[in-house]
Image (cartoon, grey):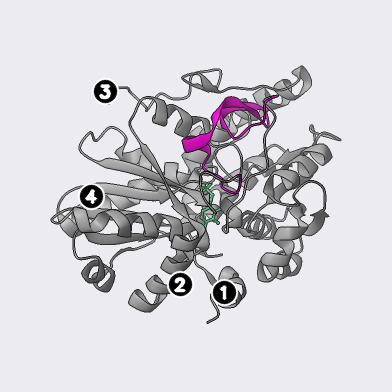
Amino acid sequence: MSRSVSTEVMPDKDGMFGPYGGQVVPPELKAIMDEITLAYEEISQKESFQNELSDLLKHYVGRPSPIYHCKRLTEHCNGATIYFKREDLNHTGAHKINHCLGEVLVAKSMGKTKVLAETGAGQHGVALATACALLGVPCEIHMGTVDIEKEHPNVMRMKVLGATIVPVTRGTATLKDAVDSAFEEYMKDPKNFFYAIGSVVGPHPFPMMVRDFQKIVGEEAKTQFNEMVGKNPDVLVACVGGGSNAIGLFTAFLEDENVRIIGVEPSGLGLETPDHAATLTKGQPGVIHGFKCYLIQDEKGDPKPVYSVASGLDYPGVGPQHSYLKDIGRVEYETVSDQECLDTFVSLSRLEGIIPALESAHAVAYAMKIAPELPGQNILINLSGRGDKDLDFVVKKMNL
Ligand SMILES: *Cc1c(COP(=O)(O)O)cnc(C)c1O
């Protein structure tokens, strides 16, 4: 396992993380992406931008989010000591507000007239609609009708926040189809529109930019954990859809060789069925939405429909940096099934009084699986979001 690779300088100037990432887009779009890269590099150096962003993260989002020692969950697992980084306590209830504020600030500084995006669980849509309302920028959200059905409360939030919602019925009517739809709209006027990508995916500079906006999670966690426990955590665990909350936690620890890092993907109804979204576990290198990464694909190399009980995790691609971290062996990628996720949703709620997002429950479920074998170790889980949005669904599904 080679762990000495410097991850700080990634990606290279072409947006490559090893063989992954880049800009697999038509020339006219590449020109626009290069413009965004330049604008981002310029603005992110400015003290005024950094001050405005940190001010909003502190006073609007409520950062730093706490580190919480889960006593009852730890007792229940009878092994490792378990801690949460509480991204569920952010304004809007998840980690996504961190990169949405950053992206909308960049869009606004570039004079863009409309910010648009897709959403899966509705969390990116709500976070983006929130950032757009706050900063006074028009917002348009594309969402699969299956997800609209499942995530009704988030749909209402986006409407109240003033966003325009575009329902998407094509394909499986979930996240990937919403991306396709939003992208088509974007291509009508990419000079004036800004496509705010919801994770560390898409063409360069988005995987880099979204990671940079999320890495505050791990930076805070490192300081907080060392203050609280006196050393780094032994193990980090985070769920991986596109990979933004995971890379947000991981980045500050990548160079710390003694920290074991685990990303958790959804195995849905089973890895042997087509109904999972375990991209890094079952996928092969390919191209989706303008970048190279591990991909769940058909014989022709086209993305295949994927599935998870957690809408925010059902994407057939994954961030290029995660693809690279898998290949060099720095991060382990494991899976958790729908059933394990649902069981954890209920047991965590009852053990700690914390209702997790179905996405985050994947990370908790995996940590609970390994905790009994790791007595004396400390596990830090990124609790990426809260589960209010999933309540109706879980109560029905679990007959509560
Ligand atoms: C969207 C979402 C995820 C998955 O997205 P990543 O980019 O992989 O982090 C995970 N947890 C929550 C709560 C989400 O809303």
Cβ of mark 3 under 8 A from ligand 1: no
- Alpha carbon distance from label 4 to label 1: 31 Å
Read off the residue under disc 3.
4
Q: Amino acid at mark 2?
A: Ile
Q: Image check: 235 left or right of 319?
A: left
Q: Position of residue 219 (x, y in %)?
A: 34, 46
Label 3 vs 2, first from the N-terminus: 3
The residue under the point 65% across, 59% down is 122
In this rendering, the label closer to the viewer, 2 or 4: 2
Cβ of mark 4 under 8 A from ligand 1: no
Instruction: Please say if the residues under marks 2 and 1 sit with CB atoms less than 8 Å apart.
Output: yes
Q: Secondary structure at mark 1?
A: helix
Q: Nearer the viewer, residue 47 or 321?
A: 321
In this rendering, the label closer to the viewer, 4 or 1: 1
Q: Position of residue 181 (x, y in %)?
A: 80, 43
> Is residue 282 inside the magenta stretch?
yes
Q: Which residues are magenta?
A: 274-299
- Alpha carbon distance from label 3 to label 4: 19 Å
Occupied quadrant, residue 261: top left
Read off the residue under disc 2.
355
Q: Amino acid at mark 1?
A: Leu
In this rendering, the label closer to the viewer, 1 or 3: 1
Q: Position of residue 18 (x, y in %)?
A: 46, 19
Instruction: Please say if the residues under marks 1 and 3 sit with CB atoms less than 8 Å apart.
Output: no
10 Å crowding of disc 3: few (<14), some (14-19), many (20+): few
Q: Amino acid at mark 4?
A: Pro
Label 2 vs 4, first from the N-terminus: 4
Q: Position of residue 187 (x, y in %)?
A: 82, 33
Read off the residue under disc 1.
391
The residue under the point 50% across, 55% down is 95
The residue under the point 38% across, 46% down is 249
Instruction: Please say if the residues under marks 4 and 1 sit with CB atoms less than 8 Å apart.
Output: no
